[in-house]
Image (tube, rainbow, N blue to C red):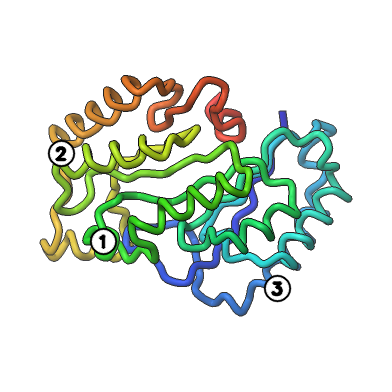
Amino acid sequence: MAGIYLHIPFCKTRCIYCDFYSSTQTELKKQYIDALCRELETRKSYLQGELLETIYFGGGTPSLLTAGNFERIFDTLDRVYNLKTCREITLEANPDDLSATYLQTLSSFPFNRISIGVQTFNDEILTLLNRRHNASQVFTAVNNCRQAGVNNISIDLIYGLPSETLEILRYDLSQVLSLRPEHLSTYCLTYEKDTPIYAMQQKRQVDEMDEEAAVSFFALVMDTLVGAGYEHYEISNFCRPGKHSQHNSAYWE
């Protein structure tokens, strides 16, 4: 099984916890896409004759790309690798990008899975994290996806957030379960060097969760999601039967 991860590094704003490579210089999108397509052409031999089965658009914020950007990428992928063999094509997206109009644009392309970066349903914490969306936009985004015919939605949650309590986490879990996503990824917040939240922690402006508390938070996540019928197929990942992430599973195997 062969898969391709495409990193789209552009963000309108930077989240304070993120240490992935990103840039707010969105005016460089066209030049970046041109370079990305050239690299796709030169790396064909890396697959060593294997069929391409999964593609994952990560970031950054891939949902900042336009129809023209996607057309350029998919034309290159199909010409160089042949998209007919792909079983899973995932787009990471911010909730506030998933308007009905944008999803209509996406319908012209072969995406069959959308991963939504929710992180929490607590608006105060979302503001602290410098996220662009609020909790109500998550519900709008998921509804828009369903209306557009998307039947494989993954939602990302983070726990161990500054000022988060078990009650806040219980609320987050109840909200996400009400949306009935096919897949959930849940991660404990890490304070990576050179991120704003790490600097805040060093100045004692926020406190990092201790190990004992992190274990109790993880236990709540696991018990709640497994109790709701999700398969716990990887340490941070849960899914409905048959809805595991094929792309990420290839890494873990």
In this view, the residue in front, 245 or 35, is 245
Residue 207 in view, yes or no: yes
Residue at image point 56% right, 52% down: 58
Mark sitting on residue 30: 3
Mark sitting on residue 24: none
Residue positioned most to the left: 204
Residue for badge 1: 197
Disc 2 crowd rating (10 Å Cα; few below 14, some 14-19, many 20+) is: some
Residue 61 pos. (x, y %): 53, 60
- Disc 3 marks a residue whose amino acid type is Lys
- Disc 1 marks a residue whose amino acid type is Ile
Q: Is residue 5 left or right of residue 98?
A: right
Q: Quadrant of the image for the N terminus?
A: top right
Q: Quadrant of the image for the C terminus?
A: top right
Residue 36 pos. (x, y %): 72, 61
Residue 169 pos. (x, y %): 22, 41
In this view, the residue in front, 147 or 208, is 147
Q: Earlier in the sequence, mark 1 or mark 3?
A: 3
Residue at image point 67% right, 69% down: 32
* Viewer-side label of 2, 1: 2
Helix, strand or loop status at disc 1:
helix
* For residue 232, above or below residue 78: above
Residue at image point 78% right, 54% down: 74
* Viewer-side label of 3, 2: 2
Residue 31 pos. (x, y %): 70, 73
| Disc 1/disc 3 C-alpha distance (Å) | 31 Å
**Location of residue 42 (image quadrant):** bottom right
- Disc 2 marks a residue whose amino acid type is Leu
Q: Earlier in the sequence, mark 3 or mark 2?
A: 3
Residue for badge 2: 166
